[in-house]
Image (cartoon, rainbow, N blue to C red):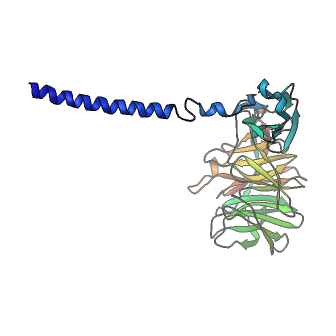
Amino acid sequence: MVNFDCMYANRFCKRFRDYLALFFVCQVVACGPGANRDPKSTERKVAVLASPLNHQVLRYGDILPVQLKLDPKYLDQIDSIVLIINEKRKFLIDRDNPNAQLPLENMALGRASVLVRIHLNSRTQENKLAYIKILSNMVPLSYTYSTIASYPHNVQSYTQGLLWHNGFLYESTGQRGFSKLLKVDLATGQALQSHDLDKSLFGEGLALWKDRLIQLTWTSGLGLVYDLSSFAEKGKFSYPGEGWGLTTDGSHLIMSNGTNELAFLNPETFAKEHSIWVMDHKGEVDKLNELEFVEGEIWANYYEYEIYRIVRIDPKTGQVTGYIDLTGLIDKDRHESIDVLNGIAYDPVGKRLWVTGKYYPKLYQIEVLVAEDL
């Protein structure tokens, strides 16, 4: 019993000595240089951005409240305070009244950055950043349709772009190895002129600018320029990301890429000049596909199976003004290979509107009606 107790007593004493040594080491470290300092306490915080909050949701037409809380200890060190919206628009904020009320009418919808930059007389600066989301302030109107007439459409055409010019349809089709540029007779659906794309390319959106047809390709980042009369290739251009739909407002080419961004391109240089982000009162409206400019609005096919929708968009703000529901359009002509609704062509002279889709057997002339009018 004595030996047994001594053995455990020795073990206890050894462990106690180890713990005691560890305790003294910790104390030395704790009492050394920088001990008991909160690392953040050494950072100067001149201001706190009280408003807007990060990820705050606002609506077009709202007032953006900017509220900055300044530490009085640093007031005499502040040279200037600059408010920067989306890295471009700049406003000065008064140091003695560091608040601002900015109307959102002139701001693009979607995600926006709000940066407050405080310049100090020590030639340093402190930045406060928040991201906000600006939604549409209108509930989109609901529209439906009536079918006026139908015309033959090549059921093997994977329609990606469609437009009307001087009595003929011009169509861009997709799928690698099958992509084409076509001039089509409305009455028969027959191609009067055809140009095959390189087998590596997937044809997409199509627009007419002066005497040139401009065609996008999907993931190749390559745009193709053709002579309207001969379909002879006149040039190429590149763009980042994907190419989906293409149209023109008479001043720009307007391009979709599958997101809620619509890019406005210079039609001569193809450089992007600005973008809008398409939003309704609930959030982003993406999957925007084939485009057409109709009576001052951008109309976009919505890319989704079994959803037959055209989105009407304000080209200045990106607000969705309405949704056209084309449910039932293809019911009588449906077949096994039918794909999504895609293809809008508008005749501004005759005020005629046609729609079709990928592998659709028909092209439909429709009239758009406010839903409650039926």
- 18 left or right of 61? left
At 86% from the left and 40% from the top, the residue drawn is 90
Quadrant of residue 321 within the rendered picture:
top right
Q: Nearer the viewer, residue 296 or 275?
A: 275
State whether residue 69 is above or below residue 157.
above
Q: Nearer the viewer, residue 79 or 344?
A: 79
Could you tell me residue 23's position as x and y percent? 40, 30
Q: Is residue 167 visible?
A: no
Quadrant of residue 161 within the rendered picture:
bottom right
Could you tell me residue 72's position as x and y percent? 79, 24
State whether residue 154 is above or below residue 9.
below
Quadrant in which the N terminus is drawn: top left
Q: Nearer the viewer, residue 322 or 254?
A: 254
Could you tell me residue 306's position as x and y percent? 61, 45
Q: Nearer the viewer, residue 186 or 143?
A: 143
Residue that lies at the very extreme toward the left in this rendered image: 1
At 12% from the left and 28% from the top, the residue drawn is 4
Could you tell me residue 373's position as x and y percent? 79, 32
Quadrant of residue 55 within the rendered picture:
top right
- 132 left or right of 107? left
Quadrant in which the C terminus is drawn: top right
At 66% from the left and 49% from the top, the residue drawn is 303
Q: How many numbered dots are placed on residues in this image?
A: 0
Q: Is residue 367 visible?
A: yes
